[in-house]
Image (cartoon, helix red, strand yellow):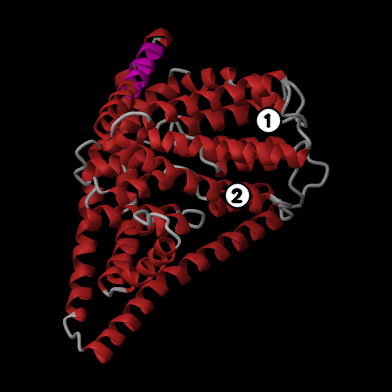
Amino acid sequence: MGERAISIFYATFAKKLAMALNYIWVAFFLLAFIVALGRTIFFGDFSIWSNIMGASFTSAATAFEISLGLTGILALWMGLMKIGERAGVIQFFGRLISPLFSRLFPGIPKGHPAMGSIFMNVSANMLGLDNAATPLGLKAMQEMQSLNPKKDTATDAMLMFLILNASGLCFIPIGIMMYRAQAGASNPTDVFLPILLATFISTFVGIVALCLKQGIKLWDKVMISWLGGLAVIVGLIVWFFSSLPKEKVELYSSFIANVLLFSVIIMFICAGLRKRINMYDCFIEGAKEGFKTAVMIIPYLVAILVAIGMFRASGAMEVITDFIAGCFNAVGINADWVAALPTALMKPLSGSGSRGMMVDLMSAYGPDAFVSRVSAAIQGSTDTTFYILAVYFGSVGVVKTRYAVPYALLADITGSVAGIVAAYIFFH
């Protein structure tokens, strides 16, 4: 497939995704108007219109304040992450997971450049280095395409790679913790362990399901030791915290999360000293990228938060969540998490949209409310599936994605459910 055909395919895929998000965004305004009109006609509620317009102004101001507040935090962590990147931490993770990945990608010859790019991409994702992960992922797709006998059809290796990215395995969810800090959470890092649990389960289920589909041996010694070992560790963490009283859960989870995060920073610095790099210059370079990122997200936050704010002020959000909560309560299932459901529904389609849902909940209920923590756990459980499909497959001109979508959505659903369960274990 020529470069022009690839560009046309990518543009078409991206346009369809953008149109879907456009319809969702417009629907927020239209539904808010319809619900408000109904409340005025049938219940004589004339104040609803001033509430809606007031919410639009408040939400726009909140979006700017959040972006402004994120500037310093984002600059700090992007600077630290740049040190880790230059110090070779990503390469270290690549070597660490090499035995496992050689089993997950049997179609890639040993020593092929594709394997190195895959290692680098997944390692960057685990460290929360989104800016580094995307170009590394595109490079990995190009390398795998060089091995592809049918250039328009996804290979097994490509599908496994897409599932690993869509399931969003991340050990350091810095972005979510930054938003919680900006919202005034008493302990912004208390969602660290629930997110780690949810994203691991999402990735684990995605890998196992795809291994079964592709005939990859799960009973291989290396596979058992890696996947089984990680599952045991996560299981022990859940067992330990579920046996503690609520106040101890929050105390210990906060302690462990902060120790791990500070340990990562020290690891970056020690690696930088070993490599003899100028860490101050690296930090400044990364901090500049963080500042640019904070400025770039302002329009996206304004767009989604205003739409959601007006939708909520109209009462439409309450109607939907009350109906769903009633259904779960009718069968005896606790429904305290239902208000976070829009985050899960938006997550596969739009990262900025689901992030906006999470921020809106923190603004409406408070960052330390149970539903806000549920939303954070869901947000950190997976990545934006359809964006990843569009970018990675579109970059190499693959138009036949085979079973990529259903297996990626399986990881999404699993991650959302795991995020809800983890929030109940740690916070309810």
Residue at x-position 75% and y-position 42%: 213
Q: Which mark is residue 410?
A: 2
* Residue located beneath label 1 in the image: 114
Decide which of 253, 78 is in the foreground and name it. Answer: 253
Look at discs 1 and 2 and give the one toward the viewer.
2
Disc 2 residue crowd, few under 14, some 14–19, many 20+, Cα 10 Å: some
**Mark 2 falls on what kind of element?**
helix
Marks 1 and 2: CB-CB under 8 Å? Answer: no
Whether residue 263 appears in magenta in the rendering, the answer is yes
Decide which of 15, 322 is in the foreground and name it. Answer: 322
Residue 365, by quadrant, is bottom left
Q: Which residues are magenta?
A: 260-272
Disc 1 residue crowd, few under 14, some 14–19, many 20+, Cα 10 Å: many
Q: Which quadrant: the C terminus?
A: top left
Q: Which mark is residue 79?
A: none
Label count reads 2
Tell me: residue 136, above or below residue 100. Answer: below
Q: Residue furthest right?
A: 149
Expressed as whole percent of the image width and height from the top left, the position of residue 69 reads: 21, 45
> What predominant SS class does the magenta segment belong to?
helix
**Mark 1 falls on what kind of element?**
helix
Residue at x-position 34% and y-position 69%: 317
Residue 290, by quadrant, is top left
Tell me: residue 419, above or below residue 308. Answer: above
Q: Say whether residue 157 is visible.
A: no
Expressed as whole percent of the image width and height from the top left, the position of residue 315 reads: 29, 73
Q: Amino acid at mark 1?
A: Ala
Expressed as whole percent of the image width and height from the top left, the position of residue 108 reads: 75, 29
- Judge from the rendering whether residue 192 lies leftward or rightward of residue 400; answer left or right: left
